[in-house]
Image (tube, rainbow, N blue to C red):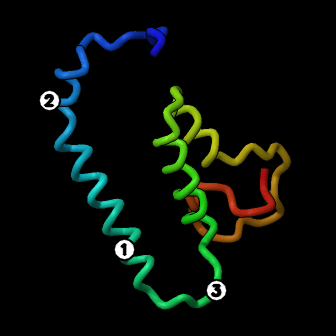
Amino acid sequence: MTSPANPSPMNRTEIADLYFLEHRARLLDLAAFLDRYDRADDDTGTDDFRLTALRNAIALLIDGSGDRTARVLDLMSDHSTEPIDQAGMKGACGTPPPGTG
């Protein structure tokens, strides 16, 4: 493994000691969300685009490559430059819908 350009001021054990329980809880929360989604009635026959993006992001987390934060952010960002006529919903949806960007 190569050295990162900006090494952490803490070693790996210190990082795990400080942050592991917090991220374990987040992982359990994500697992619970996916379980709820899987148990829900399938009203369309296809996955919601947000779940597809989430599953693709999870694949990036475990692919063994670096720059995970940047790659997940890139995956879930709208790269389109042209304005749209009207938004499909009131707020942001967290990842671009199919056919954008």
Q: Is residue 76 above or below residue 55?
A: above
Q: Is residue 37 above or below residue 2?
A: below
Looking at the image, which is closer to me, 64 or 37?
Answer: 64
Residue 17's tag is 2
- Local secondary structure at mark 2: helix
Residue that appears at 63% across and 39% down: 74
Q: As drawn, is 100 to the left or to the right of 34?
A: right
Q: Is residue 59 above or below residue 19?
A: below
Residue 35's tag is 1
The crowding category of the residue bearing disc 1, from other C-alpha atoms within 10 Å (few below 14, some 14 to 19, many at least 20), is few
- Local secondary structure at mark 1: helix
The crowding category of the residue bearing disc 3, from other C-alpha atoms within 10 Å (few below 14, some 14 to 19, many at least 20), is few
Disc 3 to disc 2, how far (Cα)? 43 Å
Give the residue type that dot 2 points to.
Answer: Asp
Q: Give the mark, 1 or 3, whose residue is nearer the N terminus.
A: 1
Q: Disc 3 marks which residue?
A: 45
Residue that appears at 53% across and 30% down: 65
Which picture quadrant has residue 35?
bottom left
Give the residue type that dot 3 points to.
Answer: Gly
Residue 70 in the image: x percent, y percent? 56, 32
Residue 64 in the image: x percent, y percent? 49, 33
Q: Is residue 69 above or below residue 35?
A: above
Looking at the image, which is closer to me, 80 or 71?
Answer: 71
- Local secondary structure at mark 3: loop
Residue 8 in the image: x percent, y percent? 32, 14
Q: As drawn, is 6 to the left or to the right of 92?
A: left
Disc 1 to disc 3, how far (Cα)? 17 Å
**In the rendered image, which quarter contains the N terminus?**
top left
Residue 61 in the image: x percent, y percent? 47, 42
Give the residue type that dot 1 points to.
Answer: Asp
